[in-house]
Amino acid sequence: MIFIKKISSFILKKPSLFLFLFIVIFTSDRYHRWASWISEEQGPFYYDIAEYYYFLPATFINHSFSADKNKDAPAPSTYNISRRTIGMAVMYSPFFFISNQVAKTYGYLQDGYSLPYKWGIHWGSIIYSILGLWFCRKNLLLFFNETVTCISLICVFFGTNLFFYTYGCGEMPHCYLFFLYSVFIFFSLKWILKDSTKHLYFLAIILGLITLIRPTDILVALFIPLFKVSSLRDLSERFKFIIHKPVALLISFVLFSFPLIIQMLIWKKNIGHYFVDMYSDEHFFFSDPQLLNILFSFRKGWLLYTPMMVFSLIGLFIAKFRLK
């Protein structure tokens, strides 16, 4: 009875921690049930994911980007390496190396595509997603209580596409970027609220990885000058804060640029150019924004497939009056 009371008290005081316990138990039973590749021979390595992942077996197993030397890869002739960066390969890499060791220890084919690699990368995606949720919790607790934080995490994980991009098609960039966004916001808050140079360096590295995976996502950097800024005076003060340690700012810029420079060198070596237009056949059509289709179309309508986000839009209007 005393033990049950203690557990109940803990759940009431720290419901968000209990949520993570539930997610771990839930994952141990459901990690394989929604995987979109479960019956496919190529595992999760298909379409975009195959192109993101290709760099790892090509570099560390076959030591060549040639399709001939990577003949075990699924449909190597379809790879468009010039269009992909190494960002996702960097994120996959810890679980790739673990999988490689498992394959060696238990006698699986060390080709980058056998069973240990399939499940290693899949589990890596799930772990990144849960870690992203953990940092999301840390960010929320800076401003909200445990109850609000727990409800928010439930909504984010079980009520948005994050669920699908964790258990179903987790090897796509979405849950990885969710993790990096959460960590970036965490280090940004630490830097802004505590003026911690160490956290500035960390956020610079994370921003570099985000940009490397999806260059347009560098827009997340706007969080730094705009967080808790409600006037031009606030904005001016924020910019003064950003540049008040010029040496640290320069070092952070170098850290941010480092992964991008490596990518440029890889492009130069394999394609002959330092810069490659990743979106050569994709553009923004500012004169025809398709707002109704973005929100409600059956193809990719945001609110149609994630109706819970209606509350976030309502919250923007409420915040205008509640949070000056």
Image (tube, grey):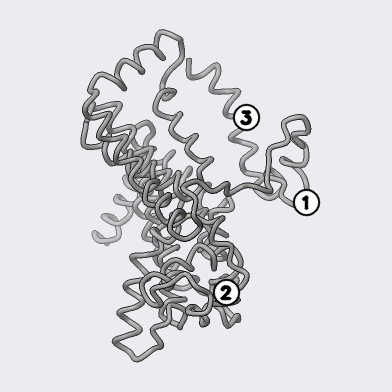
Residue at point 37% right, 36% down?
145
- The amino acid type, in three-letter code, at marker 3 is Ile
Q: Nearer the viewer, mark 3 or mark 2?
A: 2
Looking at the image, is 258 positioned above or below residue 317?
Answer: below
Q: Identify the mark at residue 98; answer none if there is no mark.
A: none
Q: Residue furthest bottom?
A: 107
Category of crowding for the residue at label 2, using alpha-carbon neighbours closer than 10 angstroms: few (below 14), some (14–19), many (at least 20): some
In the picture, measured across the screen, residue 125 lies left or right of residue 37, that is left
Question: Which residue is the site of mark 1?
Answer: 298
For the residues labelled 3 and 1, the Cα–Cα distance comes to: 22 Å
Image coordinates of residue 48 in percent, x first then y, are 58, 62
Question: Which residue is the site of mark 2?
Answer: 76
Category of crowding for the residue at label 3, using alpha-carbon neighbours closer than 10 angstroms: few (below 14), some (14–19), many (at least 20): few
Question: Which residue is the site of mark 3?
Answer: 314
Circles 3 and 2, Cβ within 8 Å, touching? The answer is: no
**Element at label 1:** loop
Q: Is residue 61 visible?
A: yes
Image coordinates of residue 270 in percent, x first then y, are 47, 60
